[in-house]
Amino acid sequence: MRDAVINFDNAATTYPKPASVRRAAFLASSQLGGNAGRGGHVLAMRSSQAVYSARETIAGFFGAEPENVVFTLNCTHALNLAIHGVMHGGGHIIISSMEHNSAARPAVSLALEKKISLSVADVTADSSETAENFRSLMRHDTKAVVCTIASNVTGQILPYKEIAGLCRERGICFIADGAQACGILDIKMSDGINILCTAGHKGLYGTAGTGLLISDGKYKLYPHIQGGTGSASSDLRQPLLLPEALESGTLNIPGIMALKAGAEFVASKGTDNIFRHEERICRRFISELSGREDIKIYRTPGAEYVPIVSFTAGDMLPERTAAVLSGYGYCLRAGFHCAALAHRTLGTKNGTVRFSPSVFSREEDAVRLAELLRNVTV
Amino acid sequence: MPSYTYVVKGGKLLRARGYHCEIIRNEKTSESGCGYSLLISGDCRKAAAVLENYGIPFSITGNSYA
């Protein structure tokens, strides 16, 4: 048994975090004692200024305006705000067949309540076919399309720019789930994204409890959570201007400052370099497992992937495989990855095991993991 | 201005154009309650045009632009 813990579950949350991120969270906890946007005393103003600077950093990273950057609890929170906000009043929504439950459940929930109608577009390995599947479902009353940029199960990159183009031509709001793509691909609002939802604690290397909703300002988002915003306090109606409209309640200032540091860390490394490093590890991992017919890798030639590898090992249940690997210090996530639709699409009855490196992962650890996997599944 | 976010953005835009601006907390900027104001020294008409041009929402209070 190994003593060291090696994290290959970075698609769930990246670990370790960069030193600058840990330092930022600590400094915010020790120095930013005021409540951002609440009051005019020196502590409140210092915190307010710090939060604004984080908005600027994130806006610069994604090509947005600072006032359109909304800090959320996580990507699920952001997707709920986006889907419920855009679909307020009804209409038709299209989601992909590879969506995480964070997008699928709010859409299904609204559909079951008969508040909206829902269609699911099939994702295949062929990008043109996938885009056509979306196009064929678009109707006169389609208000939004929700599409993950990259699947959290297989890492497959969906043709999000093409789908965004189809939406733009028809005046449909394009909501992108960037949870597995931001920090790894160079995602910009100019890709045609109207609302980008992402996690702060994955590829952006922030701490848990942070997420982002970034709007291009074209579509109104009805706020389904109301409360204190630090502004217009005598008015019992919720302000409708971003970001405060969607940020009721006290912000997670240490988390936001850590997220700012994480985005700066990613920018300093470069998303291309991060992608290359992680994908090299994935390819080596796959290569080390080649020739083993009983180990199935869920990648299809012709499709593009972010650095995630889903696999199953012989007849061993994925959860059992992950448990065995965990005994040797390797952390991989098994099961359905909160993505029922995606696993249905893939036909993986018992789920898969997911391997996902980070910028801190080492190729030699992936080689040792593959060797272990070959031995334990004989 | 409707929020701290807009008051900072507005202030940055104006400072970049040579205006002296100060962010102040007003306990009652309007009928709707507390918020933040931008105290501007200089030609306020031109400053207002800059804010309008960038889509910064604001209202005028007394001799200042709130």
Image: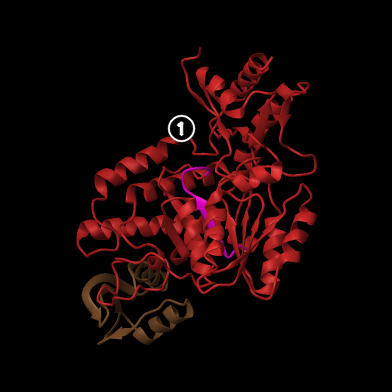
Total numbered badges shown on the rendered structure? 1
Instruction: Please state which of residues A2 and A347 is positioned toward the viewer in this rendering.
Output: A347
Residue A130 falls left or right of residue A343: right
Q: Is residue A156 above or below residue A228?
A: above
| Residue stretch rendered in magenta on the structure | A193-203
Inspect the magenta stretch and tell me whether residue A196 lies in it. yes
Residue B13 falls left or right of residue A9: left
Q: Which residue is mark 1?
A: A16
Q: Position of residue A321 (x, y in %)?
A: 59, 23
Image colouring: by chain
Q: Residue drawn at (41%, 66%), measured in percent from left and top? A: A224
Q: Position of residue A319 (x, y in %)?
A: 57, 28
Identify the hue of chain B.
brown
Identify the hue of chain A.
red
Q: Answer whether residue A63 is visible to the viewer in this image.
A: no
Q: Is residue A103 above or below residue B29?
A: above
